[in-house]
Image (cartoon, rainbow, N blue to C red):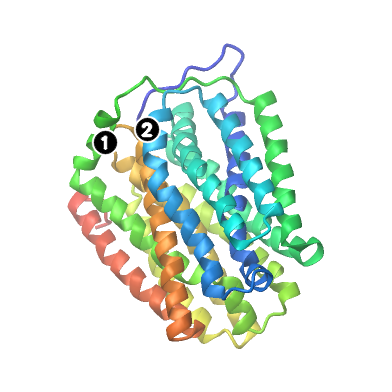
Amino acid sequence: MHGPTPSLSAGESNTGLTVTLLSIAAFAMTTTEFIIVGLLPALAKEFSVSIASAGQLVTLFAFTVMVSGPPLTALLSHYNRKHLFLVLMLVLMAANILAAVAPTFWVLAVARFVPGMVIPIFWGTASETAADLVGTKKAGKAVAHVYMGIAAGMVLGIPIGTLAATVVGWRGTFWGLSVLSLAIFGLLAQSMPSIAGNDRVHLSHQLKILHQPIFLAHLLLSVLVFTAMFTAYTYLADTLEKIAHVPSSQIGWWLMGFGVVGLVGNSFAAHFVGRHPMRPTIVAIIVLAISTVATDMWAHNSCELTIPLALWGMANTALFAISQVRVMSAASHAQALAGTLNVSMANCGIGLGAIMGGFVIENFGIQFLGLITSIIALLAIVLAIGIGRKTGKVAH
């Protein structure tokens, strides 16, 4: 990776602290984005809609990210990073408050639309900032460190939010997220150094990366990977409840386990993704394909079910960081925009996955989600191998 090194204030010397703060902010972002996965059954009951209809809240959020992320990131890339991150946290807080008081399903949809516009700005700029702070050799590890916030969100945020909803209701979960957002705002305001943004670069120049066929292939790969991931993951809570017959009060603990093993996947990504991101990409997709099918096959046996769920959790979490490093490494310039374009394409896949999963549930049954996921993953594997051969970055 490469890009302009941000200008740091005179008193800043510990780049590791800054990267850690970005990871903490990522935790709040991740929890806000994906908490809906654990709350879908409760929301469907609250607003008297089908689980597939409730799942479209995931689609709305994802498609908002896809459309708004790239232009907003490109237009804001020259702003001071600290000031930008502080504004993003305030917007996140306001959106969670709106979700907490939403009187109708449509107001809740608005509350999901608003953060969908700001989260991709964070992902693109935070990844670039972390990479530039530590230098080229450690860039992959720095991005993976920021993405540890994703793992932490899945390990702690989503499961705890799901468990909290059984005690204080799903509205209480969103209130908790608003308080968390405010607390992180205060932490960033007090501890994060002033970091200058990039030099102002015209949007048309930044968009020249879209003229590179290999870069476009990487973006398409992200769409396929995340479509595969979220065809099944969007409805994981419902799968556990309907097929594995896990009591609703225990689903949060299962999601907790899913996230905990995801830390192993994130460690895998941090260790292997630096020089040859295509290799861990292919391995993680293969594991995803096998584990989701096995989950459906073994869902009726709680002991056996833990094995594919653990593998699924590792692959799921690893692919977040791997995909970001992979796409940013493929960009010749405009790193922040490249990172956000990847987030947008990932969210395109998330939205398509939610739609695909809902379609499968309504027309074939929830037990076929793993099979469809594996088919989409197979397409991603073929494309990944093709990119690797074209760029000479698949092992020989």
Q: Is residue 303 above or below residue 283?
A: below
- For the point 52% across and 50% down, which residue is it? 113
Question: Quick one: 103 or 268, which is closer to the camera?
Answer: 103
- For the point 53% across and 61% down, which residue is it? 57
Question: Quick one: 181 or 278, which is closer to the camera?
Answer: 181
Residue 287 shows up from this direction? no
Residue 394 shows up from this direction? yes
The tally of labels here is: 2
- For the point 71% across and 37% down, which residue is it? 182
Q: Is residue 51 left or right of residue 269?
A: right
Q: Is residue 321 left or right of residue 10?
A: left
Q: Is residue 319 above or below residue 362?
A: above
Q: Residue reaching furthest top? A: 10
**Circles 1 and 2: CB distance less than 8 Å?**
yes
Rendered-image quadrant of the C terminus: bottom left
Rendered-image quadrant of the N terminus: top left
For the residues labelled 1 and 2, the Cα–Cα distance comes to: 9 Å
Q: Position of residue 359 (x, y in %)?
A: 43, 77
The residue wearing badge 1 is 207
Name the amino acid, label 2. Answer: Ala
Other residues around mark 1 within 10 Å, as few (<14) / some (14–19) / many (≥20): some
Please tell me in which quadrant of the rendered image residue 189 appears: top right
Secondary element at tag 1: helix
The residue wearing badge 2 is 74
Q: Position of residue 222 (x, y in %)?
A: 35, 55
Q: Is residue 259 left or right of residue 283?
A: right
Name the amino acid, label 1. Answer: Leu
Determine which of the numbered discs, if any, sits on residue 343 in the image: none
Mark 1 vs 2, N-terminal side: 2
